[in-house]
Image (cartoon, rainbow, N blue to C red):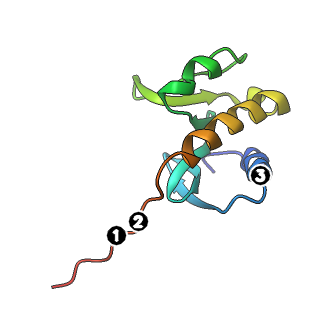
C-alpha cells in the first residue's frame, strides 16, 4: 500500500459530513468535494490544497512545507509527514484552510464520453 490507511481514516473523520468522494491519485488516495481535491494521503504523509492565498498561513504551522513533486514546487499545495498529520491541532488547521479553498471553487462537471 502506498499510504497508511490510518492516516486516510483521520482525514475521512475530519471531513465529517461533507459530501466527499475518494479517488486514487498521486500514488495515494485523494479526497474531493465537487470534483476538486481537498487533501490526500501518500507514502510520505499528507497533502492539502490551500491555494496561494493560504500558503503563508499554513507554512507557519510546525512541520508543514510546500509540496514538491519530482523536485518541482506545487503552487498552493502543502504537505506534512505522518507525525505532523497525527497532531489534531495542525491537521485541523490545514483541513480548515483546505475546505475554505475548495468551497470557493466551482464544482467540476463530469465530461460525457465521446460518441462516434
Report whether 42 appears left or right of 26: right
Report whether 8 appears left or right of 71: right
Marks 2/1: CA–CA distance: 6 Å
Q: Quadrant of residue 22?
A: bottom right
The residue lying toward the viewer, choosing from 87 and 52, is 52
Residue drawn 40% across the image and 68% down it: 110
Q: Mark 3 = which residue? A: 9
Position of the C terminus, as image quadrant, is: bottom left
Percent coordinates x, y for residue 2 in the rendering: 60, 46
Mark linked to residue 109: 2
Residue drawn 43% across the image and 27% down it: 75
Q: Are marks 2 and 1 in contact (CB under 8 Å)?
A: yes
Q: Quadrant of residue 47?
A: top right
Count of numbered circles on the image: 3
Marks 3/1: CA–CA distance: 29 Å
Residue that extends furthest to the right in the rendered view of this protein: 88
Percent coordinates x, y for residue 51 in the rendering: 50, 32
Percent coordinates x, y for residue 1 in the rendering: 63, 51
Report whether 2 appears left or right of 86: left
Amino acid at each position: 500500500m502506498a499510504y497508511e490507511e490510518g492516516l486516510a481514516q483521520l482525514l475521512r473523520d475530519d471531513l465529517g459530513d461533507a459530501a466527499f468522494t475518494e479517488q486514487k491519485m498521486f500514488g495515494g488516495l485523494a479526497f474531493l468535494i465537487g470534483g476538486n481535491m481537498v487533501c490526500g494521503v501518500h507514502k510520505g504523509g499528507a497533502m492539502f490544497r490551500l491555494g496561494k492565498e493560504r500558503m503563508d498561513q499554513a507554512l507557519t504551522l510546525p512541520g508543514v512545507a510546500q509540496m514538491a513533486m519530482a523536485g518541482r514546487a506545487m503552487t498552493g499545495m502543502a504537505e506534512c509527514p505522518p507525525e505532523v498529520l497525527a497532531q489534531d491541532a495542525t491537521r485541523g488547521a490545514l483541513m480548515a484552510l483546505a475546505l475554505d479553498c475548495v468551497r470557493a471553487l466551482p464544482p467540476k462537471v463530469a465530461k460525457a464520453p465521446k460518441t462516434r
